C-alpha cells in the first residue's frame, strides 16, 4: 500500500475546518500534515483538531511551499491572494488546489491561466459542483437522446438566511472580488451549466443588491447565448423573503426535453426526460433518481489522482475552465451596468 499524500492546508477558517478537513480525513490516501493561517492562533487551533504537530504550523506562506514533505497545497485564501499562491506553487514545483472564484478580477485570472499553461504542475480550482453525478448522466447518457439543444432554463433561488455563519466574514461583507456573492456561489452553478451544455458566448443581465450583508449585488436575472447557438435564462439569488429554495435545470431539444431538479425539498434529486419530436409522438416520461454524493470528496480524489500520476490533464476544473465561469459573472455585472445590454464573455 502506497503512503498517503501529505497536504498542507492554507487558510484554516470555517470551510477548511467544517468541510475540507473531515472530507480529506475520510479519504484513505490523503492526510493533512501541515497548516498555515495569517492569524497563527487559528492555524494552531486547526492543527490541534487535525492532529498536526505544532512544528508543522507555518509562520509564512512561502514556508508552506518550501517543505519537501508536503505533496500538495490546499489553499482556502481570500481570492485576491490566489495569484500569489499560484506563483509560489510554480516557484517551488508544488501542486496546488485553491478556492473559487479563480481570482479577484479578470486581469489576475488571466495571469493564473497563463501561469498554469506554462507548467506541468497539476493546478485545480475548487468548484465542486462540476463533480455532481448528474453532470455525466445528463451530458453523456440523456442529452444525446433529445436532439439539438435549442434552449434552457436554469434557476437557483431561495430565501435569505440571516443566521448564515459566513455573513460575519470580511470576504463576504467586503468582497474584493468582482461580483461578491454572485461570483462566489455563481461559479458553482455555471460549472454545472457549462459542463453539460458548453461555453457561454454572451450575456444580457440585470442584477441588484437586496441585503447590505451581501457586500455587493446578490440577485441575478439573465439571458445567455451559448457558443453552440442555444439560448436560455439563468437566474440566481438567495436574498428573497420567505420562499421555497429551488434549484432546477430544464433543457429543451428538437427531440425532447430534460428537467434536472435537486431542490432541497426533494428526498432525492431527479432527472425527468421525454423523448420525441412532438407531444403526439412522445415516448412518455422517464424519471431517474440520482444521488449527488460528496462532491468535495470527488474533487480531492480527482486532484490526488493527478498529483500521484504527475499528470495535469487529469484535473477536471482547470484554471481555464474556472476563468470562463468567473468571466460569465463579470459579463453579467457589466451588462447590468449597461441596463441589460448584451455583453460578450471575455476569453483568457
Image (tube, helix red, strand yellow):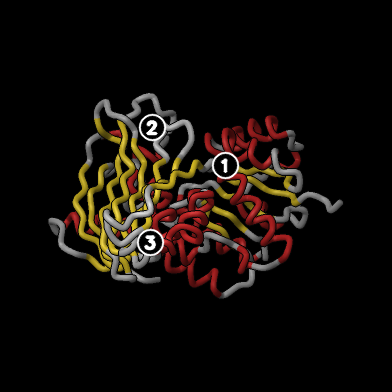
The residue shown at (38%, 61%) is: 146
Is residue 316 toward the left or the right of residue 138 in the image?
Answer: right
Quarter of image, res 48 = top right
Near-viewer residue (224 or 17): 224
Give the Cα distance between marks 3 and 1.
Answer: 26 Å
Q: Are marks 3 and 1 in contact (CB under 8 Å)?
A: no
> Compared to 130, does 159 lie above or below?
above
Residue 184: image x %, image y %? 40, 47
The one nearer the camera, 149 or 40, is 149
Question: Which badge, 1 or 2, comes first in the chain's sequence?
Answer: 2
Q: Are marks 3 and 2 in contact (CB under 8 Å)?
A: no
Does residue 117 appear anywhere in the picture? yes
Extreme-bottom residue of the structure: 118
Q: Nearer the viewer, mark 3 or mark 1?
A: 3
The mark lying in front, picked from 3 and 2, is 3
**Residue 315 horizontal side relative to residue 144, left or right:** right
- Marks 3 and 2 sit apart, C-alpha to C-alpha, by 42 Å
Say which element carries label 1: loop
Residue linked to disc 2: 167
Q: Quadrant of residue 247?
A: top left
Checking the image for residue 293, the label placed there is: 1
* Residue 6, x across and y down, in percent: 74, 49
Precedes in sequence: disc 3 or disc 2: 3
Q: Which mark is residue 146?
A: 3
Cα gap from disc 1 to disc 2, whole angstroms: 26 Å
Quarter of the rendering containing residue 297:
top right
Question: Residue reaching furthest right?
Answer: 1
Specify few, some or many for label 3: CA neighbours under 10 Å numbering under 14, 14-19, or 20 or more.
many
Residue 251 drawn above or below residue 147: above
- Image coordinates of residue 52 in percent, x first then y, are 74, 37
Disc sitting over residue 13 in the figure: none
Amino acid at each position: 500500500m502506497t503512503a498517503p499524500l501529505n497536504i498542507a492546508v492554507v487558510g484554516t477558517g470555517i470551510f477548511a475546518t467544517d468541510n475540507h478537513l473531515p472530507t480529506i480525513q475520510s479519504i484513505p490516501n490523503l492526510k493533512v500534515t501541515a497548516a498555515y493561517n495569517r492569524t497563527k492562533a487559528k492555524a494552531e487551533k486547526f492543527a490541534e483538531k487535525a492532529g498536526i504537530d505544532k512544528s508543522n504550523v507555518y509562520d509564512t506562506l512561502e514556508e508552506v511551499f518550501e517543505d519537501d514533505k508536503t505533496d500538495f497545497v490546499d489553499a482556502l485564501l481570500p481570492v485576491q491572494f490566489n495569484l500569489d499562491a499560484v506563483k509560489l506553487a510554480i516557484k517551488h514545483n508544488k501542486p496546488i488546489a485553491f478556492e473559487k472564484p479563480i481570482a479577484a478580477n479578470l486581469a489576475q485570472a488571466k495571469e493564473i491561466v497563463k501561469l498554469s499553461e506554462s507548467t506541468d504542475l497539476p493546478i485545480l480550482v475548487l468548484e465542486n459542483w462540476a463533480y455532481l453525478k448528474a453532470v455525466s448522466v445528463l451530458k453523456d447518457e440523456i442529452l444525446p437522446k433529445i436532439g439539438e439543444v435549442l434552449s434552457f432554463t436554469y434557476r437557483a433561488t431561495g430565501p435569505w438566511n440571516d443566521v448564515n455563519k459566513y455573513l460575519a466574514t470580511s470576504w463576504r461583507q467586503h468582497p474584493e472580488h468582482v461580483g461578491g456573492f454572485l461570483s462566489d456561489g455563481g461559479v458553482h452553478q455555471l460549472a454545472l451549466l457549462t459542463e453539460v451544455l458548453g461555453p457561454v458566448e454572451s450575456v444580457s443581465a440585470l442584477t441588484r443588491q437586496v441585503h447590505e450583508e451581501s457586500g455587493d449585488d446578490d440577485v441575478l436575472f439573465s439571458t445567455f447565448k451559448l457558443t453552440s447557438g442555444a439560448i436560455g435564462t439563468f437566474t440566481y439569488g438567495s436574498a428573497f423573503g420567505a420562499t421555497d429554495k429551488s434549484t432546477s435545470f430544464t433543457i429543451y431539444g428538437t427531440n425532447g426535453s430534460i428537467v434536472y431538479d435537486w431542490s432541497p425539498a426533494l428526498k432525492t434529486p431527479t432527472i425527468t426526460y421525454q423523448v420525441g419530436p412532438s407531444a403526439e409522438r412522445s415516448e412518455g416520461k422517464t424519471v431517474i433518481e440520482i444521488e449527488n454524493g460528496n462532491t468535495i470528496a470527488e474533487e480531492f480524489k480527482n486532484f490526488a489522482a493527478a498529483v500521484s500520476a504527475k499528470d495535469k490533464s487529469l484535473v477536471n476544473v482547470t484554471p481555464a475552465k474556472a476563468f470562463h465561469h468567473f468571466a460569465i459573472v463579470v459579463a453579467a455585472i457589466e451588462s447590468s451596468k449597461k441596463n441589460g445590454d448584451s455583453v460578450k464573455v471575455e476569453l483568457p
